[in-house]
Image: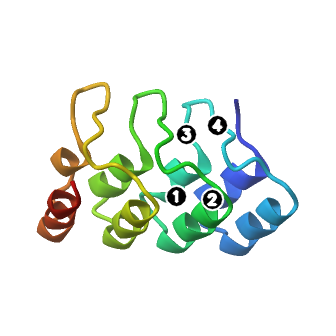
């Protein structure tokens, strides 16, 4: 656990650096000290990074130490493009975190909420 060049690139929204790290073999499932994968970090901020990470095999169902998935993080951030990409990649909207909340419980955006309800 800890921050790798990939995690730092994703946290800094450095798309090309993240892509290069992945192409050089970075572990897409490596976790930060908080248990976040690169996908979980990207899910609140960058649909392009979400897409890149998914295309390199990131698990859309991975959970962090609080039992949140990337979909939950994206819903909490009201990131509609991120939510859509994660759902298209197989993320399950009915999963619950350690507080018993689902992604739909975490969004304040009515469009995100409708999409989550429609998909699960």
- In the picture, measured across the screen, residue 43 lies left or right of residue 98, that is right
Q: Considering only order in the chain, which callout, 2 or 4, is on the residue closer to the N terminus?
A: 2
Above or below 20: residue 5: above
According to the picture, the residue beneath numbered tag 3 turns out to be: 36
Estimate the spatial distance between the alpha carbons at disc 2 and disc 3, rounded to whole Å.
11 Å
Above or below 89: residue 28: above
Q: Please tell me in which quadrant of the rendered image residue 101 appears.
A: top left
Q: Considering only order in the chain, which callout, 3 or 4, is on the residue closer to the N terminus?
A: 4
How is the protein colored in the picture?
Answer: rainbow
Residue at 25% x, 43% y is 94
Q: Are marks 4 and 2 in contact (CB under 8 Å)?
A: no
According to the picture, the residue beneath numbered tag 1 turns out to be: 42
Q: Are marks 1 and 4 in contact (CB under 8 Å)?
A: no
Residue 61 lies, in percent from the top left, at 46, 44
Estimate the spatial distance between the alpha carbons at disc 2 and disc 1, rounded to whole Å.
6 Å
- In the picture, measured across the screen, residue 117 lies left or right of residue 67, that is left
Indicate which disc residue 10 carries.
Answer: 2
Query: For numbered disc 4, what is the local secondary structure?
Result: loop
Estimate the spatial distance between the alpha carbons at disc 4 and disc 2, rounded to whole Å.
12 Å
Indicate which disc residue 31 carries.
Answer: 4
Indicate which disc residue 118 carries.
Answer: none
CA neighbours of label 4 inside 10 A, class few (<14), some (14 to 19), many (20+): many
Estimate the spatial distance between the alpha carbons at disc 4 and disc 3, rounded to whole Å.
5 Å
Residue 5 lies, in percent from the top left, at 78, 52
């Amino acid at each position: 656990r800890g921050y790798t060049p990939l995690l730092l690139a994703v946290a800094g929204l450095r798309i090309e650096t993240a892509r290069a790290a992945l192409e050089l073999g970075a572990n897409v499932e490596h976790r930060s000290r908080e248990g976040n994968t690169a996908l979980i970090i990207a899910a609140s901020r960058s649909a392009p990074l979400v897409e890149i990470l998914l295309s390199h095999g990131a698990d859309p169902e991975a959970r962090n130490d609080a039992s949140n998935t990337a979909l939950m993080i994206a819903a909490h951030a009201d990131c509609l493009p991120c939510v859509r990409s994660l759902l298209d990649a197989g993320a399950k909207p009915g999963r619950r975190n350690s507080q018993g909340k689902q992604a739909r419980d975490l969004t304040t955006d009515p469009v995100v909420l409708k999409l989550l309800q429609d998909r699960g």
